Amino acid sequence: MDCDWIKDNIVFFVYDELPDDARFEFEQHIQRCIGCRRELDAAREFKAGMAALPVQEISPNFLTSNRMELQEAVEHAQQQRSGWGMFVFDFAGWMRQVKLAPALCSALLMIGFAAGTLTTYQIVTRSQVPQPPSQAVEAAITGIESMAQQPNSNRVSITYDTVVPQTKEGEITDPAIQKLLLLACRNNRNSDLRLGCIDILKSQPEDTAVREALVYALRYDRNPGVRLKALDGLKGYVKDDVHVRDAVLEALMHDTNAGVRSEAIGLLDPVKADSSVREALQVLAERDQNKFIRSESKRYLASTPNLD
Amino acid sequence: MPAETAVLAAVGANGARRNSPSTGAMVSQAPSRVNDSELIRAAQRGDRSAFELLVRQYDQAVLRLALHLTGSEADARDIYQEAFLKAYRHIPSFRFECSFYTWIYRIVTNLCLDHLRKRQTRREDPQTTMDASGREVDTLERVSDDRAGANPERDLMRRELGAKIAQALTRLTPRERMVFELKHYQGLRLRTIGEMLNTTEETAKNTLFRATQKLRGALAPMR
């Protein structure tokens, strides 16, 4: 072990990356070689000196705003996933599973072969049976896809789509009814319908799916009346559910409707001592254009002065 | 007096101790890694709150790393958002072949490397950085001195030195910068760094050697 080796490995000694045997040899050499000891001191001083550019601590404000932004992005990604995921086949994921399970792969091949044979047999058999008359008259025609006239004849072939309206009745606690109400809250373009559905659902905010729908309506619904109804339904959960609190804070900070914002600030009373709420209130108290919001923010801040 | 002695003199005898809270910050960020696999499985089943819990275990360290590397709150924010969104999209294909923290840091380091490469192409002025509102901030302002009894002259020296170090760091190649950052400021083992950067421990070792040589060379004229 010579001085060249020591010089090549000083940095790893300083950063504690030498194996135990090499470390021992290194220490032995350093004790008897003044030149290498000086090199080691210089390397240690370099390492200590790099502290002049410390790693900055992250401010709670910066962290919170990042988390809120991410939460929204993830929510959006989840909606996309649930929307398209049902229709998109994850071929790569399926291939990985098949690769890892040869027995499953063989079984799938056999099932595929059997199903193919059976289907071919059924098609051949069915083609000889006369088709029943179409029931399309009862359904509403929504659009014509294509039309083709058979050559040298008066016959035409028309392909069209139909919609069959259905009605379902039941208690509002019935899971099937609740599912339809939740769907109507998110997808229907009719504001009156959404308003009615939110009004019914807000009576059961203890259900997580309902609460999520209310949060969604508060964040994204275009109709301020629907947002107000959602806010009303969420008021009991501002204290205990951090997602609800974030959504209410967001409405307070960014909603375009003054009525929704005024309602949102009233809901924050039980959590006004929370640091994220206080930070938001401080910003609003200083800069908000709405006089009522400014004065209410100041009033809340003044009522908890001991936490400053 | 060797260059490093001058560095130490400007920093003060407590320089090494001041560095220690940040060193190994990432390691101390993951105390409940035992619960990670449960959370990952729940997140793979579509449980968003489980994913949020995973994020909260590592996000401070991720943000700290991105902020130190980019020197800009806006860039750090972009890297943070992109990294965790990528993690969310790909968590169903997480195969438990490495720890979650190695996996998320692999994503983050790749994004940071891309960022550093782009910046190197643009040749940005390392003396100024941008804060969240887009305001230009002098690198000197990033170097704070919170020691009790610090005097203005010493503070100024320390700030100048901090700015010199920041400048010297920008002269490293993106990979050297990343290895040095993960070793010196995050306190990771070279083997882990190799795993994160999809390379061997030996390569990470050589990169660290080159990086320290370059930095010592760049800071030598400060005698």
Image (spheres, rainbow, N blue to C red):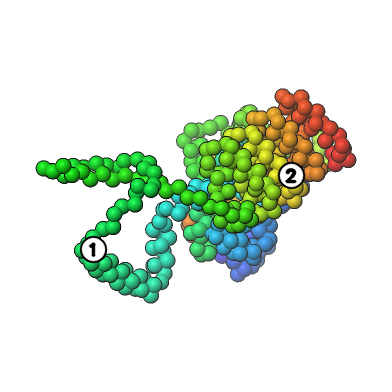
Q: Nearer the viewer, residue B208 or B95?
A: B95
Residue with the most extreme bottom position: A103
How crowded pointer 2 is (Cα within 10 Å; few <14, some 14-19, many 20+) is rated as some
Q: Which residue is mark 1?
A: A129
Dot 1 amino acid type: Val
Q: Nearer the viewer, residue A249 or A174?
A: A174
Looking at the image, residue A228 sits to the left or right of residue A86; the answer is right
- Which callout, 1 or 2, points at the residue further toward the start of the chain? 1
Looking at the image, residue B5 sits to the left or right of residue B120; the answer is right
Residue B115: assigned label? none
> In the figure, B182 relative to B37: above or below?
above
Quadrant, the N terminus of chain B = top right
Whole-percent x and y of residue A21?
Answer: 60, 69
**Chain under numbered label 2:** A
Q: Nearer the viewer, residue A209 or B94?
A: A209
Q: Which residue is mark 2?
A: A235
